[in-house]
Amino acid sequence: MARRGSYAKGVARREEILESALDVIGRRGYQNASLKQIAEVVGVTPAALLHYFGSKEELFTAVLRTRDEHDGMDPGSLPPDQAKSAFIDVIRRNAEVPGVVELFSRLAVDAADPEHPAHRYFLERSAKIRESIAGAFEEDPERHRTLDPESMARVIQAVADGLQLQWMIDPDVDMPGIIEGLMDVLYPPRPDA
């Protein structure tokens, strides 16, 4: 029985670390979020962080997964017009946490290496987003003729990722506005809406 309690405590501590790391990175930025700072917020040593995650890269990958869980967005489960709004809302929320956007962008580049701990995360996340967006477009095939749903999903994802990089350099970039405009071109609103 004690073992089960220890496991539960470990899971709770891991979740506490992830929430704290997400907060620290969101407020201070990726570059200014050291293992030491995250550990101090949680009240553990940097070595304890590595006990739970193995490496800084694994911790940061888990932070991104936690952020995704908080967003709770699955456009494929929503009607097309609601999926669009949900996707744009996530982009709006991203603008409130520049450190997490920076973490995502930097880890995405590093994860191009198949040996990187975040490689599988980015492959799976990208596939899920494209599947969700394409699924929303497939709901009403008569409304779009610009590109097939899979290609539209790739274009939207590529533009969203690229806009994040531009926004990090120039915070005046209107990420949600540009994505909304692009989606209106690729998937025009119904005239009666």
Image (tube, rainbow, N blue to C red):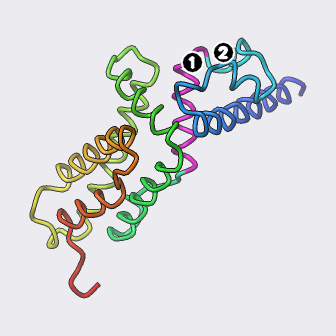
Q: Are marks 1 and 2 in contact (CB under 8 Å)?
A: yes
Q: Residue at x 21, y 84 (%)?
A: 191
Crowding near pointer 2: few (<14 within 10 Å), some, many (20+)?
A: some
Whether residue 190 is situated above or below residue 96 in the rendered picture:
below
Q: Give yes or no for residue 104 being in the magenta stretch.
A: no
Q: Which residues are magenta?
A: 54-70
Q: Which residue is disc 1 drawn over?
A: 56
Q: Give yes or no for residue 55 being in the magenta stretch.
A: yes
Q: Nearer the viewer, residue 66 or 33?
A: 33
Can you tell which mark lies on residue 50? 2
* Residue 113 horizontal/vertical position (percent): 33, 17
Label 1 sits on what residue type? Lys
Q: Residue at x 58, y 15 (%)?
A: 55
As helix, strand or loop, the secondary structure at mark 1 comes to: helix
Residue 47 figure quarter? top right
Q: Nearer the viewer, residue 138 or 73?
A: 73
Residue that protrudes farthest toward the right in the picture: 2
Whether residue 141 is situated above or below residue 6 in the rendered picture:
below
Looking at marks 1 and 2 on the same chain, the residue that comes earlier in the sequence is marked by 2
Q: Which quarter of the rendered picture does the N terminus lie within?
A: top right
Label 2 sits on what residue type? Leu
* Residue 147 horizontal/vertical position (percent): 11, 56
Main SS, magenta region, reads helix
Image-based side of 78 in relation to 34, left or right = left
